[in-house]
Image (cartoon, grey):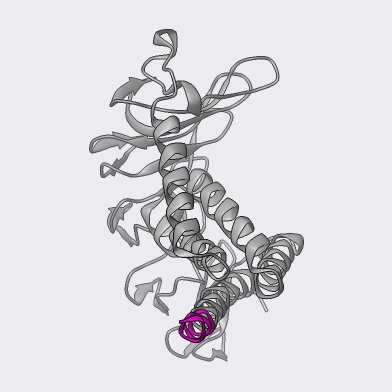
Amino acid sequence: MKKKENVASRYLRLLVRALMLAWAGFWIWFVLSVSLGEEPAPPWWIPAAWLSGLALLVLLAWKRPALGGVAFLAFGACSAAVFAHPGARALLSAPAIALGLGCLAQGWTARSLARAGLFACALVLCGCLAPQDPADLPFQTRSILRHDDGRMKRAFLLEETELEGFPCQRWVWWYEDGGLDNVELAEDRAVQGHGFPAGTRLFFDRGGRLCNAWLARDTMLDGLPCRGRFKISTAFHENGRVRAFFPPDDLELDGVLCEASLFHPVYLHADGRLRQCKLARDVMLDGVTFDQGDTLTLDESGRPLR
């Protein structure tokens, strides 16, 4: 019996390690691809922190499964709270929680696992039964985060609510002065000259102007096909026109065929003319040939910047 348990424990350890490496490998690839492919690139410390954190998490779980399991569970819970998008929870949070449970299971008996499961259920039940202050409605009391001066910074809506003229749902964020930072639309709505579908998260600058959007689905804005879902960002100039977007398919603008990519957005000038993109085919401008795959940058008159 003991030998069978040892064999089962060994297979479980190998399985958990393989899944852990696959999960970490995917996120290492994703972070590097985004960091090296985006323009402008994020500050170096952001991908460095992600990669270091992933490496330490995997190393801890590899050497000390019990401690690593707790760390994976904590990471999964925190990431689920921070990244409310279903895609992030499915690819980041849920696998981390499953890996955490797998790490903890390596050295536990069936009785210990049952007790841990009951304890986890009790924690979830306690969280669901946390008291709701009627004065906080329509916001969930335990979700409220405040700025140093006591003003609201973040809160979760328990029901669809209109805030400053926007039909909102789920998470709402505010600036220190009380102005809206970002909201998720509960229904289709035209905002500052653009029609956005329900589920789109809109971001505003401190002056209340639309600056970014996470589209709920592929949407036409300024006559341009903009990719939606998975927190893919579409940016706007101060005059309201599209500044940067990700087309779902190769798109020709001003005689230039721009490549559809998740890592290389198409940038536009404030008048709507092409500013920068990754080329989907060769193009000749001012007697110079730019090859497919190159990043082409144009000035406001449409001339290439070398």
Main secondary structure of the magenta stretch: helix
The image position of residue 107, as x and y in percent, is 58, 68
Total label count?
0
The image position of residue 214, as x and y in percent, is 41, 50
Looking at the picture, does residue 285 appear above or below residue 265? below
Of residues 207 and 51, which is closer to you in this image? 51
Q: At 43% from the left edge and 51% from the top edge, which residue is drawn?
A: 117
Q: Is residue 4 magenta?
A: yes
Looking at the picture, does residue 280 appear above or below residue 137? below
Of residues 100 and 89, which is closer to you in this image? 100
Q: Is residue 306 visible?
A: yes
Q: In which quadrant of the rendered view does residue 90 lie?
A: bottom left
Of residues 196 and 287, which is closer to you in this image? 196
Q: In which quadrant of the rendered view does residue 174 lie?
A: top right
State which region is magenta.
Answer: 1-11
Q: Is residue 274 visible?
A: no
Of residues 189 and 277, which is closer to you in this image? 189
Looking at the picture, does residue 121 appear above or below residue 136? below
The image position of residue 230, as x and y in percent, is 39, 59
Q: Residue furthest top?
A: 135
Image side of residue 116 versus residue 303, left or right: left
Q: At 65% from the left edge and 22% from the top edge, which residue is drawn?
A: 147
Q: Residue furthest left?
A: 188
Q: At 47% from the left edge and 44% from the top edge, which residue is drawn?
A: 119
Pick the quarter of the image with the N terminus: bottom left
Image side of residue 50 versus residue 270, left or right: right
Q: Is residue 157 magenta?
A: no
